[in-house]
Amino acid sequence: MSTSATSPLSVPPRAATRPPVLEIGGLCVDYGVGDGAVRALHDVDLTLRRGEVLGLAGESGSGKSTLAYAVTRLLSPPGVITGGDVRYHPRAGDPVDVLAMTPRELRAFRWQEVSIVFQGAMNSLNPVHTVRTQLTDVLRAHRPQMSRAERAGRARELLSLVGISPDRLGAYPHQLSGGMRQRVMIAMALALEPEVVVMDEPTTALDVVMQRQILRQLVRLREELDFSVVFITHDISLLIEFSDRIAIMYGGRVVEQAGAAEIYRDPRHPYSHGLLHSFPALHGPRRELTGIPGSPPDLRAMPSGCAFHPRCPKAFEPCGVRTPHLAPVTDPGTGADTDTDTGRSVACWLNDDRRDGEA
Amino acid sequence: MSEERSEEHAAPPPGAAPDTAPGPGPGTAPDGRVVLEAEEVSKHFPVRRGVHALLGGERRAVHAVDDVSLRLRRGSVTALVGESGSGKSTVARLLAQLHPATAGEIRLDGRPVRAGRGRAFRAYCRHVQLIFQDPFASLNPVHTVRYHLTRALRIHGRAGSGAAELEKALAALLERVQLTPASRYLDAFPHELSGGQRQRVAIARAMAAGPRVLLADEPVSMLDVSIRLGVLNLLRDLKERLDLAILYITHDIASARYFADETLVMYAGRMVEGGDSETVTQHPAHPYTRLLLASAPDPDRVTGGSGDGAAGGDGGNGGKGADPSASEPPSLISPPAGCRFHPRCPLAMERCRDRTPPRFELDGGQWAACWLYDTSQDAPAAGAGRGAAS
Ligand SMILES: Nc1ncnc2c1ncn2[C@@H]1O[C@H](COP(=O)(O)OP(=O)(O)OP(=O)(O)O)[C@@H](O)[C@H]1O
Ligand code: SF4
Ligand code: SF4
Ligand SMILES: [Mg+2]
């Protein structure tokens, strides 16, 4: 049933079969140390492929930003990475262990290989410098061999890339609208042609019209320049529309991972199901909305077993005591793993049960 | 959402037939269900420009709201949708009498009201209550739920006499917003509650006045997706059980479709379209409403990442063609003459540049302030515009 329901809208094979660019395995992050420590990320496994848009969804506090900061090594105290690994695969050469990089290697890695647009970034441009200065500064720091004229040319090119007329290069941030500032931040993130762009709520503060315009531009650029995007937002509708693949987080874990269309048509984790039935659809028949009872968990008092069990309408006996782990989704009909090419997986005892039954 | 509701929306609600009649305007028959109405209300905020004022130059003002008319009816939710900065919150604050209007009239039960202070204002608040977007900022962190609610009950003289009656009133309030058992919440501080619970307390506090009108300014936009629905359902439940008139302000037009009986759309300080929610969201008439709908996130448009919206979605085509989203909303200090949307409108005509379009009535109570629907003499046929952009 799942196969036929999802096939017309499956992920473009291009993204699904491409090699990984970032591989995250068993990543754990704590805030604080010793007795006061709370675990914000638990055993996160996630792979980003070359050229894809990977969406991260989840409620406030589920660990989306923590994940973004951890993989770019930008986590600041009291955040500590307490386990796991992050591997970066350059286009040529052997994979690199991001967590073992020296500060010097890290400086080259960021911007050059992986860049990040932060939550609320449009307010992080320096108010006393022009757009030109801020763009050329990035280039000067990382491409010292470029001449002044080359840098200026590249800055013009970058602005046009994000749809701003190059005659705005002399503008100060306050002379630009929120949407333009956000686009300048995106231009900066693209300045050194990174392989991966991490965008944490890049458009939340913007109007829907502007938001769509920016995301469209980004998707077009992604096609031209072939970078990958990790896209973080609360807005599930937006995420489904713009991502190739989606990972849903709950209480610091990835609880389901699949193609965007697959998750939308056929969510397997009860939390994913609840999320998808929490917001109204704009078109089509008015579907029934159920929402999710209760509220998101508190890190300091995380429920035992499956963290979702107090809110889960399908909870049964193992849920309160044993923690389910991400496992490939099996097709109930054949027992075969479905969609193995997109790596569909879910962390829920219901799925495991089905696997056991089929095995 | 329950099934009956969806049916009620699909066909015009039987009981509400007279309510969906053309929007307010001179000459409309009085409507017994209208509680609060605004007629051609404007609000201009002066821009302080020392030099200009000194030199006696033209006083500049932000035209936050111009000529807005609307009616809130008992037992009905009216959504006010628009981009940020379009004047939605200013409309709510005008209706709440937190700002005096620059022009126009606000009427409660048909009687004009004027922003006052002290007693008169408090008397007005008994009927009209405002709920804000941020449940974190609207409750004082050093006081318990009991304190907030008791104070509100006392101010409005609804605390009863004696401790037992107060306790009963408090429990009834919390029960009304589905925070039960009351004993678990009464002595809690705001920080001990989740966002959704805090917003419920804020709603309970508004209900302490026993109002007939609730103005809810983005009441769920700060809440997590999974708990938004619960708060919206609560508001709907209050509307139904207490026959409240609710103004639901939102930038999320999909939630207006789900939750509101009637939807009004604002652009750059003016109301541009209105009608029953299903019609406005499924058959938008105004070019701006179409742009808004075409831009709203919609998973049914999913194309596996191109994001360009070819599949699904009958109401908008992703806004291709003359890309009106290329420009930005106008400055409200010197808003464009004529139709304020004309600099971005793909269908703009000559007269759009200098003549402000009035409301044109369409079928089924829908209206649009757009010259495309002018059916008089030399004007293009009303249907033409609708076909051209959809
Ligand atoms: N500096 C910090 N000290 C202690 N705890 C923190 C710190 N930063 C984040 N946390 C906690 O870690 C958890 C995950 O936070 P994170 O910011 O990653 O969530 P998020 O999914 O990005 O949320 P949002 O959607 O609100 O942006 C939260 O419970 C948060 O309170
Ligand atoms: S493991 Fe149990 S509680 Fe958790 S989501 Fe699955 S069924 Fe629900
Ligand atoms: S009045 Fe003219 S400019 Fe305004 S929306 Fe209608 S067609 Fe466009
Ligand atoms: Mg975050």
Image (tube, grey):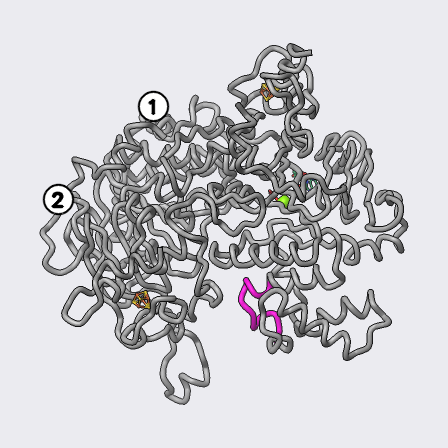
Residue sitting at x 56%, y 16%? A315
Residue span colored magenta: A171-181
Residue under disc 2 on the same chain as residue under disc 1: yes
Front-most of B284 and B35?
B284
Reply above or below: B314 against B381.
above
For residue A345, side relative to residue B150 (left or right)? right
Determine the chain carrying the residue at label 1. Answer: B
Q: Chain of mark 2?
A: B
Asked if disc 2 and disc 1 are in contact, CB closer than 8 Å, the reply is: no
Type of the residue with mark 1: Ala
- Are there few (<14), some (14-19), or many (20+) residues within 10 Å of tag 2? few
Task: Tell me the quadrant of ligand 4.
Answer: top right
Look at the image and tell me in which quarter the C terminus of chain B lies. bottom left
Q: Residue at x 69, y 33 (%)?
A: A341
Q: Which residue is mark 1?
A: B164
Residue that mark 2 sits on: B32
Helix, strand or loop at label 2? It is: loop
Q: Residue at x 44, y 57 (%)?
A: B319
Ligand 1 closer than 8 Å to label 1 CB = no
User: Reading the chain from its start, which is encountered first: label 2 or label 1?
Assistant: 2
Q: Does the magenta segment cover residue B25?
A: no
Judge whether residue A128 can be spotted in this image: no
Residue B142 visible to an observer of this rendering = yes
Quarter of the image with the N terminus of chain B in it: top left
Label 1 residue SS: helix
Q: Quadrant of residue B162?
A: top left
The residue under label 2 is which amino acid type?
Answer: Gly
Q: Position of residue B20 (x, y in %)?
A: 19, 46
The residue sitting at 42% across, 23% down in the picture is B180
Would you say the magenta stretch is mainly helix, strand or loop? helix
> Where residue B198 appears, x then y in whole percent?
47, 37
Give the CA separation, mark 2 to mark 1.
38 Å
